[in-house]
Amino acid sequence: MAGEGVRDSTTDDNIDLTDACNNLWSLRTDKGGNVHTPVTISYEHHKVHEGKLFGAGYYSSSVANNGAINVLLQTPVGTTAHVYLKVNVGGDAVFRAFEGTTVSAAGTAITPIDHNRETANTATITVTHTPTITDDGTQLWEEFIPGGTSSGGGGGGGGSHPGAVATTLSEQIILKADETYLLRLTNISGGAQPEDITFSFYEVPAST
């Protein structure tokens, strides 16, 4: 393990260590440096503490039948991202994702929010909604999302308690650097429905 900036364990309440698999271990100590217990957290949780995990999304309270909400993600040169994607719908819908999308206008900006509110970090990925699309690009993903599957009924998802409407789709994807991605959620329920695309991500240098 390699230490993360802790200089004097006799004056720190916590010692943060990172192992070879990038897992963060936080060692609880007292002022005398006696270790009480090790605590491990996930890499994503570690990114939150670093101030490098961001969240963004777009919600529409009423999407017409056969209408859609579109979210655009543009990665800069040299930077890619690990994205955790969630989608919620009020009725039957189809989710699609595209790579290499071209647009004549990027749409309205969405500011990704740093999940560590103690830092002032900003994302380098550009996120917008309602772009003007000239070509969808290459379809990467297509999935039907059935409505009315909640344990309480009336919405997409499988809730853990009566009346709950859980996320109907929850997936991960690693984006390429210097690329444009389109996330599209199309309502096919036969009537107007609420729809939501939301995601969190952390950025990493591109491997090539």
Image (cartoon, grey):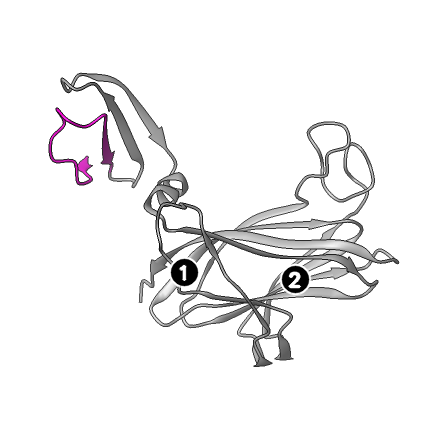
Viewer-side label of 2, 1: 1
| Residue 91 horizontal/vertical position (percent) | 80, 50
| Label 1 crowd bin: few (<14), some (14–19), many (20+), radius 10 Å | some
Q: What quarter of the picture does the C terminus occupy?
A: bottom left
Question: Mark 2 = which residue?
Answer: 96
Q: Which mark is residue 123?
A: 1
The type of residue carrying mark 2 is Arg
Up the image or down, 143 lies above or below 73; here it is above
Q: Residue at x 39, y 44 (%)?
A: 48
Q: Which residues are magenta?
A: 1-19
- Of all residues shown, which one is farthest toward the right? 190
Question: What kind of residue is marked 1?
Answer: Ala
Principal secondary structure, stretch drawn in magenta: loop
Helix, strand or loop for disc 1:
loop
Above or below — where is 205 with respect to 151?
below
Q: Position of residue 42 (x, y in %)?
A: 39, 36
x%, y% of residue 67?
Answer: 78, 66
